């Protein structure tokens, strides 16, 4: 899922919100090219199948690494980009948890000091991951799919062709009167969006989410995320010699407007792209040709 700046503000709960829904890797069935006339499945059953795929494939994704680049643009009130920074990571999985190791900052490899610091950080995170069950969050909070659906009102289930493949879509919006506990659940009440589920593979193909109300952290004293802040996430099947037919994250984008500590306005666009998926196994086999299929636009 896309990383966001000021991670203590947004990234923790966005990751917790999305992680039960998103499965980075799975082996799909042969997808039809036309929508089905079969009755639509219930939303809870559909999402249960999505999560079950993720659990089944936890060991499979341990055999994959990929690179990701996050570009952060600071934007002024007129929409002009005033500053651009980027970070490149090598991502891999430990005990079902994704670990991100920074390898470049603003296009430059890390200095010896930065590399040493990053090695220490990643080592501690790997040790923590080994002791944390795959179905529990490594950092921050998490909300289960069933709990998320209790907080959200879902509507308008329908079928469509998305990037050449049949998909089941539904809309969701947080219930303002829902009783919630913790940052993640509180934020869920402020969200609305649409999710695209690949019908053949029961995988999240696309997700669009928007804050339909201001979200205040610590009553607004720490931060206030403004209405209209949004993000989206994409996955796609890839074609390669070693990773034929696997679903992989291809990136996402976030647009956020917030006020931090009552005095600092923040307007940022974050774009993440994931690429260079590599497979390795007991024989240290690798494939650097894994690329997301270039789908036709919906």
Image (cartoon, rainbow, N blue to C red):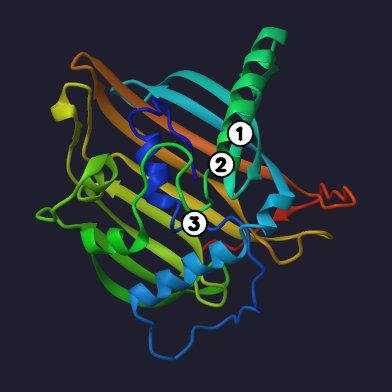
Query: Tag 3's secondary structure?
Result: loop
* Image depth: mark 1 or mark 3 in front: 1
Instruction: Kindly identify the residue that appears in the image at 76 percent across and 52 percent down.
Output: 290
Q: Residues within 10 Å of mark 2 (few under 14, many from 20)?
A: few
Task: Give me the residue at 42% from left, 43% from top.
Answer: 15
Q: Is residue 95 left or right of residue 172?
A: right
Asked whether disc 2 touches disc 1, contact meaning CB atoms under 8 Å apart, the reply is yes
Residues at marks 3 and 2, CA–CA distance in whole angstroms: 22 Å
- Answer with the quarter of the image where residue 21 lies: bottom left
Q: Residue furthest right?
A: 283
Residue at screen point 46% across, 49% down: 136
Determine contact: label 3, label 2, CB under 8 Å. Answer: no
Q: Is residue 113 above or below residue 132?
A: above
The disc, 3 or 2, on the residue closer to the chain's N-terminal end is: 3
Residue 53 can be seen in this image? yes
Instruction: Name the residue carrying label 2.
Output: 131
Q: Relative to residue 91, is residue 170 drawn left or right?
A: left
Provide the residue designation for mark 1. 127
Q: Is residue 234 above or below residue 246?
A: above
Q: Label 1, label 3: how many angstroms apart (C-alpha)?
A: 24 Å
Q: Which residue is denoted by mark 3 in the rendering?
A: 22
- 1 or 3: tag closer to the N-terminus: 3
């Amino acid at each position: 899922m896309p990383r966001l700046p000021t991670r203590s503000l947004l990234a923790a709960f966005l990751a917790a919100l999305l992680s039960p829904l998103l499965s980075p890797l799975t082996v799909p069935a042969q997808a039809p090219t036309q929508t089905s006339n079969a009755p639509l499945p219930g939303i809870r059953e559909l999402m249960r199948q999505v999560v079950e795929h993720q659990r089944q494939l936890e060991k499979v994704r341990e055999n994959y690494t990929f690179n990701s680049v996050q570009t952060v643009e600071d934007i002024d009130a007129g929409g002009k980009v005033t500053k651009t920074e980027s970070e490149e990571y090598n991502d891999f999985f430990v005990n079902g948890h994704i670990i991100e190791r920074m390898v470049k900052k603003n296009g430059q490899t890390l200095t010896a000091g930065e590399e040493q610091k990053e090695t220490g950080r990643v080592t501690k995170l790997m040790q923590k991951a080994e002791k944390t069950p795959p179905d529990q969050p490594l950092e921050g909070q998490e909300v289960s799919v069933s709990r998320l659906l209790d907080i959200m009102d879902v509507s308008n289930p329908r079928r469509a062709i998305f990037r050449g493949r049949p998909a089941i879509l539904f809309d969701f919006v947080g219930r303002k009167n829902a009783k919630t506990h913790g940052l993640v659940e509180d934020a869920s009440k402020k969200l609305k969006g649409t999710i695209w589920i690949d019908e053949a593979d029961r995988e999240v193909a696309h997700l669009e989410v928007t804050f339909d109300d201001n979200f205040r952290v610590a009553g607004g004293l720490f931060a206030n995320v403004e209405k209209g802040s949004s993000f989206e996430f994409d996955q796609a099947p890839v074609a390669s010699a070693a990773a034929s037919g696997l679903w992989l994250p291809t990136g996402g984008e976030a647009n956020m407007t917030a006020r931090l500590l009552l005095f600092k306005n923040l307007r940022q666009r974050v774009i993440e792209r994931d690429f260079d998926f590599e497979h390795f196994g007991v024989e240290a086999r690798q494939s650097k040709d894994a690329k997301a299929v270039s789908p036709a636009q919906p």
